[in-house]
Image: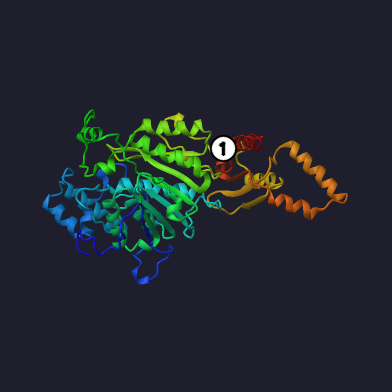
Amino acid sequence: MENGDLASLPIPPFTHLQRYWFGDGEYKDSATIPPFSDEFATRLPYAEKFEACDFNALAKGDPAFKELWEKTEGRLNFQDPATSVALAKAILKVDFNLKLELPDDRLCPPIPNRFSYVYWIQRLIDGTDPDYNISDWNPNRKVIGLDIGTGASAIYTMLCLQTRIKWTMCATDIDKKSFDWAVRNLAINRLATRAKMIQTIDSNPLIPLQHLNVETLDFTMCNPPFFNNPYEMRASLRGDNKAAPPNSICTGAEVEMVCPGGDLGFVTRIFEESLILGEKVGWYTSLLGKLDSAKAIIALLKNHDINNWVVGVIDMGKTKRWIVGWSFGDRRPPTSFARPPGIPHELLPLATDYRITLPVKNHDDGFLANAVADILSSLKWKSWKWDRAKVPAACGIGEATKNVWNRAFRRQVEREARRLAAGGNPDVEMKAAEEEKVVMAFRVRVWESESLVVADWLRGTDHVIWESFCVSYER
């Protein structure tokens, strides 16, 4: 396929909605599978400062970048569009075994910034695993996401697919040129069989489940247009009212960078659609270019009594981006993820962990873990699993359908036991209990050497129940 030649792509005539369906999510020919290893799936994000990129390693792994590196004697000009493209291609080739082709008049993505968002999504999905396997990523878990406004590079979609082999992605774009090049990039990287793409128009929803022919999504992600009008965009790109001008050139077109209301207007549209779709999407997420925009979205969440949200920040030196995600479901992400440092306190969600440091010292090995296990095992959970040998801390996971730690409930259990002993029907009682909905799931970990017990809220919508459990547990 020659550079710029899109004729060989199977693009149907454009009507109101242009649809691409690239298969059923499985590779058809093992010979076409791009090399994949756990290195991709478990790699960490790049250093915060862009300058920390190892250009020498990139030059060794990519001949085209090596030529540029030697020609400039190691002094890259990031105001040169060709340099930005060469660097992006080199990083994708060396670090992810991906190819990239772009037109001159569309955005060239800074890869470290883009992968930081993908890595954040991975941690969100891993931290809310339905099987409560939140300490490690599950390589067999099938996940489907939506990249809203994928752009000519389809960069988020490609990085998601290349780093998680069981994931499939949907992607949309309103711009025909960007859409065509996104299709091309998926095709040349042999990722097309795990992607579903549609070109949308203004009247389509931003989350077009019906057009995508999917009933549910695990997450959405979005890098929205940040600017309200072209004048605002040009002023920002010039560095007006900034301490220093941008350190790299932006080749983005107005169709990629501008929309009514800017980033806040665009993400507000996603939020309004989320109110309708509810739990059909596990997590709604988006980047935001301004802290004030993040504050406004979280204010919307609070005003609608949505208390399950997460915030994040991507800091690449001169450029800072915020991430906000929210859910109508009951899976609770870890506090260490949902409440990162450096975020204003009023933007932070409810804490989902509770720490108890006991004054007991020099006790026998296993004393504390056994005591915790004995206390929790005595309660009437829907399910309870305890792993004394778990490393680095003994760990138990439980599910509750009621406030089983409450004294009144325990007295009720005693009365029920006496009633059953007098001739009740245990089979009927047991079946009714199994069908009750889980109102809270939790994990308890015990560090013997530190006399530390940590409880994590894994599932639930009622923070009053969670707080009641923590207070009772500490007593």
Secondary structure of the residue carrying numbered label 1 = strand
Q: Position of residue 196 (x, y in %)?
A: 39, 57
Residue underneath mark 1: 354
x 27%, y 57%: residue: 94
The answer to whether one can see residue 202 in this image is: yes
Q: Is residue 124 left or right of residue 378?
A: left
User: Looking at the picture, does residue 304 appear above or below residue 74?
Assistant: above
Q: Quadrant of the N terminus?
A: bottom left
Q: Quadrant of the C terminus?
A: top right
* In the image, residue 209 above or below residue 26: above
Pick whichever, 51 or 417, lies toward us: 417
The answer to whether residue 413 is left or right of residue 7 is: right
Return the residue nearer the eye: 50 or 30: 30
Q: Amino acid at mark 1?
A: Tyr
Which percent across, then down, holds residue 294? 40, 34
Q: Position of residue 324 (x, y in %)?
A: 42, 39
**Quadrant position of residue 3:** bottom left
- The part of the image, by quadrant, that contains residue 360 is top right
In the rendered image, residue 472, in percent from the top left (x then y), is placed at 66, 36
